């Protein structure tokens, strides 16, 4: 019993050391905010489209897994992410929707004309209100929505090849078969 | 010289830069005061160590306006804050709520203090209770004297 008491400080040290080891992991980003909406119904929205576009509404998602990508023409990381989005829809087999965050429609159009349009449909969220309902705090952000219309995952910042292959694809496949 | 001094004084009197823009303010001072008090407790998600009251990030502006809209529409303070935590989670609260997940955060320091105080108390008690060493016997004293003499 006595000896166990002497081990207590050692045990506390080990606990603190393990905590620091995890918290100081270089791959961990402490500024990343966990989404409050995981497994909750996606917020209802009905956004107008770009010139000649049909717009985007949650009501149109029903029954299918979908990817929603918030982007803006003024957002540099979105430009970096763009080439990965170009082939994405074909690769994952579910619709990829874009929501233009706080962007003038003309600028969005110019951006897509320059780099190509990877989206199945685009909603214009000039006020940023829909983004706030999703809990977006910086573009780009990407959400995975399941067949029941619930948000299942959020990616903060530009998608990477490894995030697509390692997280997005497996999740979409799993959601499609469930 | 006097003007320079006056200018310096003026600069000192300017309150810390406020991010709240005049156009954002509510016309009702009571409601505006509530909005201010609330926004001082809410974290800006872009510059994460600032409140939305201090931050000049566009998102902070949007959230300030939204908060004022909710309050003007008759929300209680709790409802207005819940509107934001529903979207951004407890992360936006600069003062985290007391709940099982935050017990360690709230009560950890007190627990460590109590643990240390308890340990110190046990240690001190034990030291006091230890019986003082028995005084030297006559034979021992004589032996010491002899040893000291021998040494000298």
Image (cartoon, grey):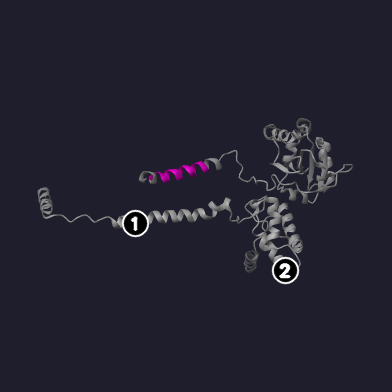
Tell me if I can see residue B19 in this picture.
Answer: no
- Answer whether residue A11 is magenta in the image: yes
In the image, B2 versus B34, the foreground residue is: B34
The image position of residue B35, as x and y in percent, is 70, 62
> Marks 1 and 2: same chain?
yes
Q: Is residue A173 left or right of residue A122?
A: left
Residue B29: assigned label = 2
Compared to residue A100, the image places residue A85 above or below, namely above
Which quarter shows the N terminus of chain A? top left
Disc 1 element: helix
Residue B124: assigned label = 1
The image position of residue A54, as x and y in percent, is 87, 42
In percent of the image, x 61 and y 42: which residue is there?
A29
Compared to residue A167, the image places residue B6 above or below, namely below
In percent of the image, x 65 and y 53: which residue is there?
B92
In percent of the image, x 35 and y 54: which residue is there?
B123
Q: Is residue B55 left or right of residue B139?
A: right
- Answer whether residue B25 is magenta in the image: no
Mark 1 crowdedness (10 Å alpha carbons): few <14, some 14-19, many ≥20: few
Q: Which residues are magenta?
A: A6-19
Tell me if I can see residue A14 in this picture.
Answer: yes
């Amino acid at each position: 019993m006595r000896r166990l008491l002497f081990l207590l400080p050692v045990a506390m040290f080990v606990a603190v050391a393990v905590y620091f080891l995890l918290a100081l992991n270089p791959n961990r980003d402490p500024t990343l905010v966990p989404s409050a909406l995981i497994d909750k119904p996606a917020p209802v929205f009905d956004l107008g489209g770009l010139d000649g576009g049909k717009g985007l509404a949650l009501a149109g998602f029903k029954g299918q897994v979908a990817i929603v990508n918030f982007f803006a023409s003024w957002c540099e990381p979105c430009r970096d992410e763009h080439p990965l989005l170009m082939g994405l829809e074909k690769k994952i087999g579910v619709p990829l929707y874009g929501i233009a965050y706080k962007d003038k429609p003309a600028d969005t159009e110019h951006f897509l004309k320059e780099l190509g349009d990877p989206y199945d449909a685009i909603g214009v969220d000039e006020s940023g209100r829909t983004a706030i309902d999703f809990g977006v705090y910086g573009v780009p952000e990407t959400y995975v929505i399941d067949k029941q219309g619930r948000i299942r995952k959020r990616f903060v910042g530009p998608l990477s090849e490894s995030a697509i292959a390692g997280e997005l694809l497996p999740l979409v496949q799993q959601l499609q078969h469930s | 010289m006097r003007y320079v001094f006056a200018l310096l004084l003026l600069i000192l009197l300017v309150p810390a830069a406020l991010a709240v823009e005049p156009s954002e303010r509510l016309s009702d001072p009571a409601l505006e005061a509530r909005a201010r008090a609330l926004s001082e407790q809410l974290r800006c998600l872009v510059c994460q160590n600032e409140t939305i009251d201090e931050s000049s990030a566009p998102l902070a502006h949007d959230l300030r306006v939204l908060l004022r809209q909710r309050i003007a529409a008759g929300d209680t303070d709790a409802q207005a804050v819940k509107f934001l935590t529903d979207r951004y989670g407890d992360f936006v609260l600069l003062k985290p709520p007391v709940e099982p997940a935050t017990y360690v955060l709230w009560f950890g320091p007190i627990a460590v203090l109590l643990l240390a105080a308890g340990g110190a108390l046990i240690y001190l008690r034990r030291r006091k209770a230890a019986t003082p060493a028995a005084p030297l016997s006559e034979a021992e004293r004589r032996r010491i004297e002899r040893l000291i003499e021998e040494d000298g």
